[in-house]
Amino acid sequence: MYGQNTYKFTKVMHQENPEARNKLSKGHAMDLTTSVFEKLPDIFINEVEDKTNYIKIIGRENNKRVYKYIKRKYVIDHENLNKYKVLLPKSNGSGAIGEVLSTPLIGEPLIGHTQTFISIGAFDKKIEAENVMKYIKTKFARTLLGVLKITQDNPPAKWKYVPLQDFTSNSDIDWTKSIHEIDEQLYRKYNLSKDEIEFIETKVKEMN
């Protein structure tokens, strides 16, 4: 998992846009903060004719999820920038056990994110990111997330007790199944008792 601070500006961005530093919060000159779209509208733009030297960044503007273009050379290379990944809001819900996640989505290659999001994985194949999506929607995974996530804050550290899975076709989990059927496979894999299964099934809402 990658935290909200993993995407950073390059020194080149500041060299070519010396006024940018004064528009950013003290100590965050290199960070793609949650408000960076509003603070640097000349650097993050809505459309470009030639996308060759640009990447997309997802963030929030006017309380909506939006994508903006930025020059590729302005963002430091990141392990999952050129890969498929799953994007999740850094803040989610209230911390209730097994709560529904706020609309996770697949991040295509050449898409990064601001501090509004965290990301999971760096996959060559889209299907593997889709399998991650299924996994984090299971009642099993969300229950274990709830062990540490007791507020709306959703950093990678809160996922400590959610077991890592193999998301390839070689996995011991059949990811082609429905989320409910994947839950059943996970209950068997981790030898959950009837009481534990009943607790999860009755207390945790489904996600589709």
Image: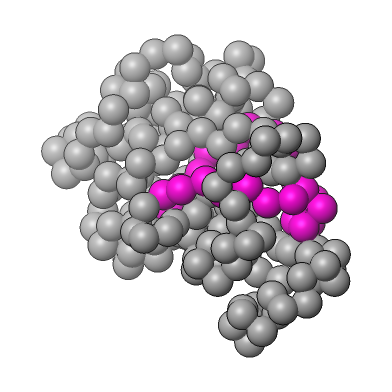
Compared to residue 169, the image places residue 109 above or below, namely below
| Residue at left offset 56%, top offset 29% | 129
Check the picture and name the quadrant holding the C terminus. top left
| Residue at left offset 56%, top offset 58% | 114
Q: Give the range drawn in magenta.
A: 65-89
| Residue at left offset 60%, top offset 32% | 108
Percent from the top left, x then y, of residue 163? 51, 41
Compared to residue 127, the image places residue 1 above or below, namely below
**Which one is in front, 188 or 23?**
23
**Which one is in front, 190 or 107?**
107
Compared to residue 10, the image places residue 143 above or below, namely above
Task: Please name the colour scheme applied to the rendered image.
Answer: one colour
Residue 21 in the figure: left or right of residue 73: left
> Which image quarter: residue 177?
top left
**Which one is in front, 47 or 107?**
47
Percent from the top left, x then y, of residue 20? 69, 75
